[in-house]
Image (spheres, rainbow, N blue to C red):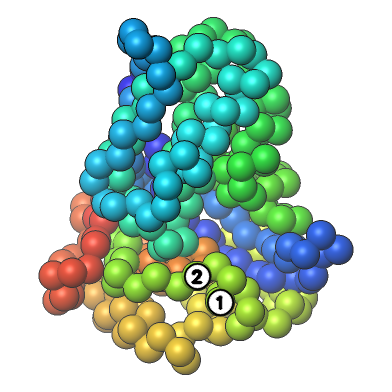
Amino acid sequence: MLVFPNAKLNLGLYITGQRPDGFRNLESVFVPLPWCDALEVLPASEPAETTLTLTGIPIPGDPSTNLCHRAYELLRVDFNLPPVRQYLHKVVPIGAGLGGGSADAAFALRALNDLYELNLSVEILVGYARQLGSDCAFFIANKPVFAYEKGDVFEEVSLNLTGTGCKVVYPGLHISTAEAYSRVTPRPPRHDLREALRQPLETWRETISNDFEDALTPFYPVLGEIKEQLYAAGATYVSLSGSGSAVYGLFPGLELPPKLALPAAYLVWDGRL
């Protein structure tokens, strides 16, 4: 079973309040980004032992704590799954605000569901995904949604960016989620996000923002520098994704976004949504 977990972008991100459980309430629109890892899930051969092999971008920590392994453990306990071998080739950068780890976990759930014909519904898979992380649930249905509460409750949105040129720039800067949230003061959104997204993309620059971007750019000026470069290259809308540090630009109508003069160490994805 070979699957390709894709990343996501945040169109707007507002931190709206503190929750009793210690998390923050937020509002954002999530859209799939076709920058993908590769994950293969196979039944383990004799001697039967569950393994996770990691290649590509190094992933810190013990593989036993990896979200793909944790996804397997959730289903193993409930459905008595046999041992498996998982191979994850990491391409989407870590700590970029693109949801790469969450996607890997959700796609592991989906792959195991298909491999062992568990016939779990989307709703049940979403329930398992929520146990692994707030972003994970999005990648089960993997379509544009308005996300709120912890970012794991969704409403459908009428939004079609299919064919829009996109450039994502990751400067290799790791900003911890804890630090990012510590720098944001919750407040009501300055604009109704769903209404703003119904307007022409040319208006988004004035009405749609990311609270993390405003809070983090003074401490990490490179975020603002990338944003300026993308606008100078002709992007219609530019934003930080998630809590960063990836910055993306949307270029409607272009075959591919133009190249930028960026350091070789930066990771860049070019394509169409």
Classify mark 1: helix, strand or loop.
helix
> Mark 2 and mark 1 in contact (Cβ < 8 Å)?
yes
Q: Is residue 204 left or right of residue 220?
A: right
The residue carrying pointer 2 sits among few (fewer than 14), some (14 to 19) or many (20 or more) residues within 10 Å by Cα, namely some
Near-viewer residue (83 or 244): 83
Which picture quadrant has residue 224? Answer: bottom left
Q: Is residue 263 left or right of residue 77?
A: left
**Residue at 73 percent of width and 65 percent of height:** 24
Q: Which mark is residue 152?
A: none
The residue carrying pointer 1 sits among few (fewer than 14), some (14 to 19) or many (20 or more) residues within 10 Å by Cα, namely few
Residue 245 is at least partly visible in this image: yes
Residue named by callout 1: 179
Residue named by callout 2: 176
Q: Amino acid at mark 1?
A: Glu
Q: Is residue 18 left or right of residue 260?
A: right
Q: Is residue 58 above or below residue 51?
A: below
Q: Amino acid at mark 2?
A: Ser
Give residue 96's position: percent from left, percent from top: 41, 62
Near-viewer residue (212 or 66): 66
CA–CA distance between discs 1 and 2?
Answer: 5 Å
Which picture quadrant has residue 16? Answer: bottom right
Q: Is residue 233 above or below residue 268?
A: below
